[in-house]
Image (cartoon, rainbow, N blue to C red):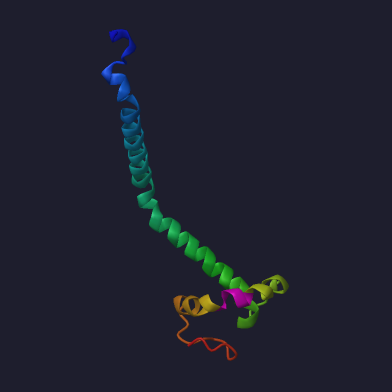
Amino acid sequence: MEDNKTPNNLENMPDRLKDNQSWWQRFVAGLNEFYNAPYRQTMARAARDEEDFFMLLMFAESLGIDNPASFYTLELQPLFLENFHEWHTRMGMDRCPFDHVGCC
């Protein structure tokens, strides 16, 4: 009759596997955070610089700079106009350089 019973450690095996998997997932997440944390600020700065350059390309024609891609970027200006105030203050322009845009 004892043969039909499963040993006690086999009954708890799925729980132990779940605990080990959750521990392993937390460990891997901690390692990823440890590796990525020093670069997070650098990557955010690079993304902001890329966005600033893109905004300059979009509004270059309006600022008086020749832009060979102005035909393509003209369609995007209304989408990025709400971010324009943050951009021109970050670029050092205290007031909006456009007469037709009243963001300040």
Is residue 6 visible to the viewer in this orientation of the structure?
A: yes
Q: Is residue 40 above or below residue 57?
A: above
Q: Bounds of the magenta span?
A: 77-81
* Image position of 73 (left or right of 14): right
| Quarter holding residue 100 | bottom right
Residue 25 x/y as whole percent = 37, 38
Is residue 67 visible to the viewer in this orientation of the structure?
A: no
Residue 15 x/y as whole percent = 32, 30
| Quarter holding residue 22 | top left
**Which one is nearer the viewer's eye here, 20 or 101?**
20
Tell me what residue is drawn at x 62 percent, y 78 percent: 78
Tell me what residue is drawn at x 53 percent, y 89 percent: 102
Residue 29 x/y as whole percent = 36, 43
* Image position of 100 (left or right of 39): right
| Quarter holding residue 66 | bottom right
* Image position of 41 (left or right of 91): left
Magenta segment: does it hold 29?
no
* Image position of 74 (left or right of 28): right
Q: Main secondary structure of the magenta part?
A: helix
Q: Is residue 3 above or below residue 25?
A: above
Residue 57 x/y as whole percent = 61, 71
Q: Is residue 64 above or below residue 36?
A: below
Q: Is residue 30 above or below residue 103?
A: above
Tell me what residue is drawn at x 38 percent, y 43 percent: 32
Number of marks present in the image shown: 0
**Which one is nearer the viewer's eye here, 38 or 79?**
79
